[in-house]
Image (spheres, rainbow, N blue to C red):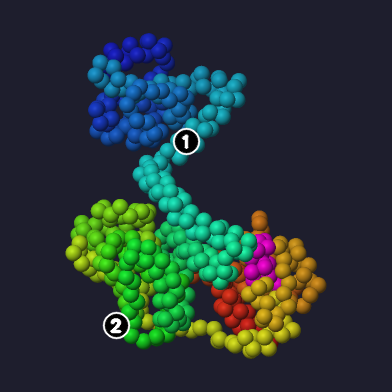
Amino acid sequence: MMIPEAVKHFLIKHKKGQGFYCVELDEKFNAKHCYGEAKELGISPPRLGKPIVDFLPVLLTESFDKDFEIPFYNISDNHVCHVYFTRTNDRIFLILVDKSEIFHITKKYQQFAHDDNISKNMFKRLSEDLAITQAQLKKSNQEKATLIAMLSHELGTPLTSILGYSELLMNEDINIKKGLTIINRNAVYLKQMIENTLIFGRTEAGGIQKQLEKVSLNTLFSTIKSIVLPLAEAKSLKIQFDFTDNEVINIDITRTKQILINLLNNAVKYTDEGFIELKFTIKNNSYVFSVIDSGIGISKSQQISIFSPWERIEESTAKGAGIGLFISQKLAEAIGAKLSLKYSSKEFGSIFQLNVPIQKLTNLKIYSPEETKKICQGKSILIIDDDPDILELIDAFLYSSGLKIYTAQDMIIAEKLLKDNGIDIILTDYYLGNVKSDSYVKKFKSMQNVPMILMTALPSSQINVQYKAQGFDAVLPKPLNSKKLIQTIVQFITKKS
């Protein structure tokens, strides 16, 4: 096929008389005709009718809205060329001009060309993956930007309260109980926000560990009420909690509470007048929690995607990022429960339902404070964490247990304490600066064969198996539950005795 005159003029004008290969494109940038010998550049011709980006992945980053040049592109193992995109006389061309000889000469005498060649090769490999991940990356960036904006707003209010009331307490300008109550409530809210954010990055249900515990409905609902009530009262909404008996149930308290708070927060957000209700029943061997509101409802078109991230009710001006229901559903899946929208209309509001299968609880034996002190008297624990505030907190948790407490902020100090003292149990964080505690398990157990309990944030069932395979005897999730911490320690001390 004859070379188009426009291409000849282009090569002469740019003084590109070396070997070349030319592809004519249609308006959709698909390969239309080819000119020259592709094998001279060590490549195979593009498939006609297919996008030119399939032929040269490096073009994925180009917009094709104007002429451009990609210099010194490594087109094959032994050939380097300049890549030109140009429009001439209502025709579109991609022209590859062989620059192998000049490139290799330049590479020999200029280190810059050498570095440039390496970077182009690296970019070529990366660009092949870019074709698949391009859309996901764009969406991810949008989600991160939205999440950051949401967090800036949502975390600002409780932080302001915590800082303000702590200052009032330090100046003795407020009742201690009132100040601590407000600080604690806002800290709990911050914890939930942070957990929601962390969970958003772990959408696989297997990444969350189910932890069954006993709790009375009165205790569970009172805790939830203390968090949600101020939000409802600020909008003059009536909030009701409906359950027949103060029954003790076995659930993953943290996850179930988080789901219900997310649902109730949403109900308050999208209800301008009327009521919010949290109702509990037992049906078909499941605990059934229903969140009912008299709000604006959800249109049928949105009900299909309401559990997708970033979905918000179009008619509402309420603020929020739209990840609460998405996170709640992932949490429900993780604990073996089912979250669903049972009903919604603009006239009567919405009903969300959480069904949690009833399961038997294999829990630690509960010891009274007196029993704990008797068992722990004369025993010692080594606590290892690089955060001094955490060490002080755990020391406070265990203060009345009867244990002799040793603390270390790194493994060097821990090893010396273990060598010089009789230690009955070790409690350690996983990450200690640049050191991971799993690298010391065998060494410490060879020095003194004591149980080692690991503290880690948001553990998963799969990761816990790995930790125990490494030699840890138990894994406790952060933030620590003081009662569970003490009961776990007592359990191992009792076994050892």
Q: Quadrant of the N terminus?
A: top left
Q: State the residue position of label 1.
A: 123
Circle 1 Cα neighbour tier, 10 Å, few/some/many (<14 / 14–19 / ≥20): some
Disc 2 is placed on an element classified as strand
* Front-lying residue, 442 or 301: 301
* Front-lying residue, 32 or 86: 86
Left or right, 65 with respect to 152, comes to left
Residue 485 is a magenta residue = no
Q: What span is colored magenta in the figure?
A: 382-394
Q: Position of residue 77 (x, y in %)?
A: 47, 31
| Label total for image | 2
Q: Earlier in the sequence, mark 2 or mark 1?
A: 1
Q: Position of residue 420 (x, y in %)?
A: 81, 72
Q: State the residue position of label 2.
A: 283
Identify the residue at image location x=60%, y=88%. Answer: 368
Of all residues, the one furthest to the right in this rendering is 420
Check disc 2 and give the amino acid type: Lys
In the image, which disc is placed on residue 17?
none
Please tell me whether residue 156 is drawn above or below residue 32 in the rendered image. Answer: below
